[in-house]
Image (cartoon, rainbow, N blue to C red):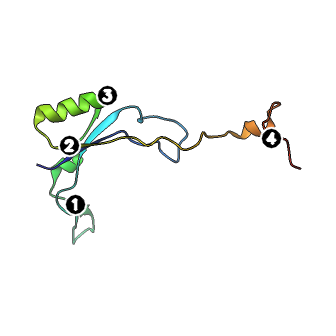
Amino acid sequence: MSTARIFRPAKDPTQSGLARTKQWTLEFEQTSPRETEPLMGWTSSSDMLQQVRLEFDTKEEAIAYATREGLAYRVEEPHQPLRRGISYSDNFKYNRTAPWTH
């Protein structure tokens, strides 16, 4: 049996929303390498656990599931963003923290 990875997905960099970032995900690590099919050139794998992706509301629920099923797992804590996003309209606020330079 392969190792399960429990993590909270990061925000999609191409979108501004936070959809699908609040739940914890359990997915299995790759145990066999992907192979290229010679006729069509598609990649495939004989490992069917790569297709399994379970979502849980909390980290504790995901850990409890892995423990109950006897799965080896590792938990990856989410990274916090380094800075707050600044919107374009903040440039024109009446109470700006820094005055205009031009």
Location of residue 66 in the rendering, given as x and y in whole percent from the top left corner = 17, 36
Callout in the foreground (4, 1) = 4
Spot the residue most to the right.
102
Pointers 2 and 3 in contact (CB under 8 A)? no
As measured in the structure, the alpha-carbon distance from the residue carrying label 1 to the one carrying label 3 is 32 Å
Q: Is mark 2 on a helix, strand or loop?
A: strand
Q: Earlier in the sequence, mark 3 or mark 4?
A: 3
Decide: is 39 above or below 25.
below
* Cα distance in 3D space between marks 4 and 1: 55 Å
Confirm or deny contact between disc 3 and disc 4 (CB under 8 A): no
Q: What residue type is labelled 3?
A: Thr
- Callouts 1 and 3 close, C-beta under 8 Å: no
Viewer-side residue, 84 vs 29: 84
Along the polypeptide, which appears first: circle 2 or circle 1?
1
Nearest the camera: 56 or 101? Answer: 101
Left or right of residue 79, residue 38 in this image: left
> For residue 58, which numbered disc appears in the image?
3
Residue position for label 1: 44
The residue under label 2 is 73
Q: Please tell me how many numbered marks the rendered image carries.
A: 4
Mark 2 or 1, closer to the camera: 2
Above or below — where is 3 with respect to 57? below
Residue 70, given in percent of the width and then of the height, sits at: 10, 37
For this rendering, which residue is in front, 83 or 50? 83
Closest to the camera, between mark 2 and mark 4, is 4
Q: Point out the tag, 2 or 3, that comes first from the N-terminus.
A: 3
Quadrant in the rendering for residue 35: bottom left
Sequence-wise, the earlier of marks 2 and 4 is: 2
Q: Is mark 4 on a helix, strand or loop?
A: loop
> Which residue is at 51% across, 47% downward?
13
Q: Which amino acid does label 2 sit on?
A: Tyr
